Amino acid sequence: MIIEVKNLKKTYEGRVPTHALKNINFGIKKGEFVALMGRSGSGKSTLLHQLGLLDTPTSGEIIMNGNNLVLLDEKKKSEFRLKELGYVFQSYALLPELTALESVYLPLMLLGVTKKEYIKKASEMLDKVGLGDRLQHLPREMSGGEQQRVAIARALVNSPAILFADEPTANLDTESSEVILKLFKKLNKEIGQTIVMVTHEPDDKKYVDRVIWLKDGVIES
């Protein structure tokens, strides 16, 4: 297993506590393309945020590389996210003043990679997602689907162990959504990229290896 979840719980405190995740247990193999599915409020995005170290569970373990990631301090979590994990969200989260190339090589700059190397790797990744001719374009000069492909290239440029995608096609039309999902499938098959994707679209099942269904904070199947 590339990642294993044991007895994971997430409770949001308040006058009436909300038990968003209740004793979750499962594992994901290296190279799998997995979808987290369920109705709104089922806990799928909450689970993704725990796996991606974007939030801290109330209790339980998230095991990766033999380590319980829950126990890492904030500095080590930040380092782990930068080196080992990639993220794609509904919003493309591109800075308006950065070109596609600059957006993609930013994570490599933060890792201390040389300028020659980070420009080379960013250019290659943009080419891999079909944007080799759009390196110098700003977000306003690209369609929503193209911006999301820039976000995918940025997420993958540091060769993460796992790519997390939280409803990555929610803001796209049907044609652009299909392009993004086919791209995920291509990356999964060609470079063996492990992908964990939250989606609410039943048709997306045909692109993934396995679906983990959630209902009211528990795994249904």
Image: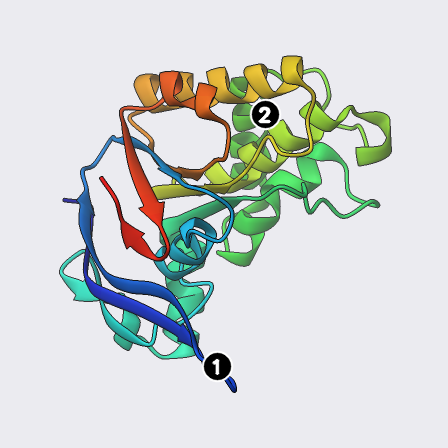
Distance, label 2 to label 1, CA atoms, is 47 Å
Mark 2 sits on what residue? 126
Amino acid carrying mark 2 in the image: Leu
Q: Nearer the viewer, residue 146 or 110?
A: 146
At x 42% / y 49%, what residue is drawn? 44
At x 24% / y 30%, what residue is drawn? 31
Q: Which of 155 and 54 is in front in this view?
A: 54
Amino acid carrying mark 1 in the image: Val
Q: In which quarter of the image is the C terminus?
A: top left
Q: Which mark is residue 16?
A: 1
Vertical arrangement, residue 208 with respect to residue 41, above or below: above
Tell me where residue 152 sits by quadrant.
top right
Vertical arrangement, residue 50 with respect to residue 194, above or below: below
Query: Please, what secondary structure does the residue beneath circle 1 have?
Result: loop
Q: How many residues crowd mark 2 within 10 Å: few (<14), some (14–19), many (20+)?
A: many
Q: Quadrant of the N terminus?
A: top left
